[in-house]
Image (cartoon, rainbow, N blue to C red):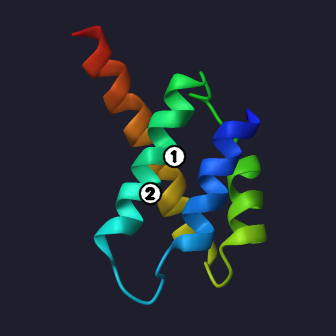
C-alpha cells in the first residue's frame, strides 16, 4: 500500500465518530477508497488493511474490520465498473 493511501486510511480511523454513524465518517472512508484507486492500491491485502485498523481504530472487533474491508473492495469494484463505462 502506498504511503498516501495508508495516510487516508489512518485519517479515516483517527477521525471516525465510532459511537454514531456520522455522515463525514463515510465521506472520509470513500475518500480513502478513491485515493486507493488512483494510487493503484486496488488489491490491498486484507491482513495489511486489518493491521492498520487494529493500530488506529481502537475498539473495532473482527466482524467490523471485515465489514470495512468489504466496503473497500466494493468501492474499488464500483470504481472499476464506472471507469470501464
Residue 55 location (% of width, % of height): 78, 69
The reply, left or right, for residue 26 in relation to residue 44 is: left
Instruction: Kindly state the secondary structure of the residue where label 2 is placed.
Output: helix
The reply, left or right, for residue 13 in relation to residue 31 is: right
Figure check: 64 above or below 3: below
Q: Nearer the viewer, residue 67 or 14?
A: 14
Residue 30 location (% of width, % of height): 40, 48
The reply, left or right, for residue 54 in relation to residue 29 is: right
Residue 69 location (% of width, % of height): 54, 52
Figure check: 55 above or below 9: below
Q: Nearer the viewer, residue 15 or 72?
A: 15
What residue is rendered at 33% in x and 79% in y?
A: 21
Quarter-of-image position of residue 22:
bottom left
What residue is rendered at 47% in x and 50% in y?
A: 70
The CA distance from mark 2 to mark 1 is: 6 Å
Query: Mark 2 — residue?
Result: 28
What residue is rendered at 35% in x and 27% in y?
A: 79
Q: Number of callouts in the render? A: 2
Do residues under tags 2 and 1 come within 8 Å of each other at their CB atoms?
A: yes
Residue 15 location (% of width, % of height): 55, 72
Residue count near mark 1 (Cα–Cα under 10 Å), binned few <14, some 14–19, many ≥20: many
Q: Nearer the viewer, residue 63 or 30?
A: 30
Residue 32 - label: 1
Amino acid at each position: 500500500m502506498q504511503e498516501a493511501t495508508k495516510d487516508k486510511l489512518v485519517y479515516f480511523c483517527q477521525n471516525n465518530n465510532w459511537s454514531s454513524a456520522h455522515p463525514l465518517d463515510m465521506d472520509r472512508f470513500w475518500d480513502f477508497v478513491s485515493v486507493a484507486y488512483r494510487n493503484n492500491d486496488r488489491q490491498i491485502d486484507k491482513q495489511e488493511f486489518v493491521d492498520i485498523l487494529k493500530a488506529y481504530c481502537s475498539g473495532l472487533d473482527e466482524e467490523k474490520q471485515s465489514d470495512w474491508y468489504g466496503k473497500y473492495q466494493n468501492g474499488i469494484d464500483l470504481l472499476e465498473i464506472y471507469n470501464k463505462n
